[in-house]
Image: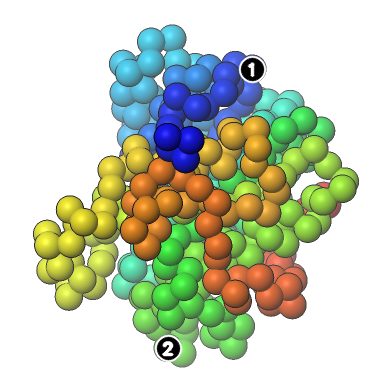
Amino acid sequence: MANRWTEQDIPAQKGRLAVVTGANSGLGFEAARALAAHGASVVLAVRDVDKGKHAAGRIADAVPGADTSVQQLDLTSLESVRNAAEQLRSAYSTIDLLINNAGVMYTPRQTTSDGFELQFGTNHLGHFALTGLLLDRMLAVPGSRVVTVSSVGHRIRARIDFDDLQGERSYNRVAAYGQSKLANLMFTYELQRRLSGTADTIAVAAHPGAANTDLMRNMPAALRALVPFVAPIVTQSPAMGALSIVRAATDPNVRGGQYYGPGGFLETRGYPKIVESSPQSHDTTIQQRLWTVSEQLTGVTFPV
């Protein structure tokens, strides 16, 4: 079927360098494996280097001759983000793909080492800073892409609460996750507008549907109790969930500012296609305000 985009549809990636955050497990691992299987050199950017090396070994077992390396990156620390970016910039003169995949979901209120609410700080601000620090390595590369992973959660109790961005006055973990995933989309759309007409680089978003990954562990108890009953209907494997990300990263027909997700039941599962994000995600005033605030919070400005 024409609409069944699979790993077999990934074009040759030989000569391309991909940096994948959170690549030691789940969606990031599957995306890294698929890219390596098609010839890309893949940097597994992970918080735990030992887990990253173990993941690289698993990729090598599945893909003999895979070209992988491991880069320490802790998105909950701007110092770590800066160090990782500096090391990547020293090692590579160009980067073809940056896949902003790592994330946390539904965590109790905690803060990053910089004092940001954990979900917003990790899922949005850490990736915002990393992208800004690496972007000049991508701008001159034809076909380079920044792919940021959002979620259907960007529709659930989600808004950018500028009056309480860090959830200090009131915290709800579902709403905080929704805010962070909405921020991922707004970042993508605003970055694409800034890249438009000035660079060979595009910004794209993707979501994995209801992929059965470690992220599920912090789900509220009431939802967790339902998982055994609904999982067979709505969830899919990490490999299937990663297809949307890999399509956004490699399909020659992808255009900047598009959003890819599963084409099946309520976008929870299925083969990847272009999907729509919520109306509020397209609010350019909020996108631009979020961008300005993100620059102020991270101290990172972009070369576009």
**Closest to the observer, 251 or 180:** 251
Q: Amino acid at mark 1?
A: Gly
How would you rate the neighbour count of disc 2 (Cα within 10 Å): few for under 14, some for 14-19, many for 20 or more? few
The location of residue 2, given as percent across then percent down, is 48, 35
In the figure, 144 relative to 229: above or below? above
- Is residue 133 visible from the viewing direction of this image? no
User: What colouring method underlies this structural image?
Assistant: rainbow
Residue at mark 2: 170
Q: Which residue is mark 1?
A: 15
Gap in angstroms between the C-alphas marked 2 and 1? 48 Å
In terms of secondary structure, where does tag 1 sit?
Answer: loop
Which of these two is toward me, 49 or 303? 303
| Circle nearer the N terminus (2, 1) | 1
Within 10 angstroms of label 1, few (less than 14), some, or many (20 or more) residues?
few
Tag of residue 59: none
Q: Is residue 199 left or right of residue 101?
A: right
- The reply to whether the C-beta atoms of the residues labelled 2 and 1 are less than 8 Å apart is no
**Left or right, residue 294 beside residue 74:** right
Q: Amino acid at mark 2?
A: Ser
Instruction: Determine the residue positioned at 53% across, 17% down.
Output: 39
Helix, strand or loop at mark 2: loop
Residue 175 appears left or right of 19: left
Residue at 43 percent of width and 9 percent of height: 65
Q: Residue furthest right?
A: 198
Residue 34: image location, x then y, percent = 44, 28
Judged left or right of residue 126, residue 272 is left
Q: Split into 4 quadrants, where in the image is the N terminus?
A: top left
Q: Going by the picture, which residue comes out furthest to the front?
A: 1
Residue at 32% in and 27% down: 54
- Between disc 2 and disc 1, the foreground one is 1
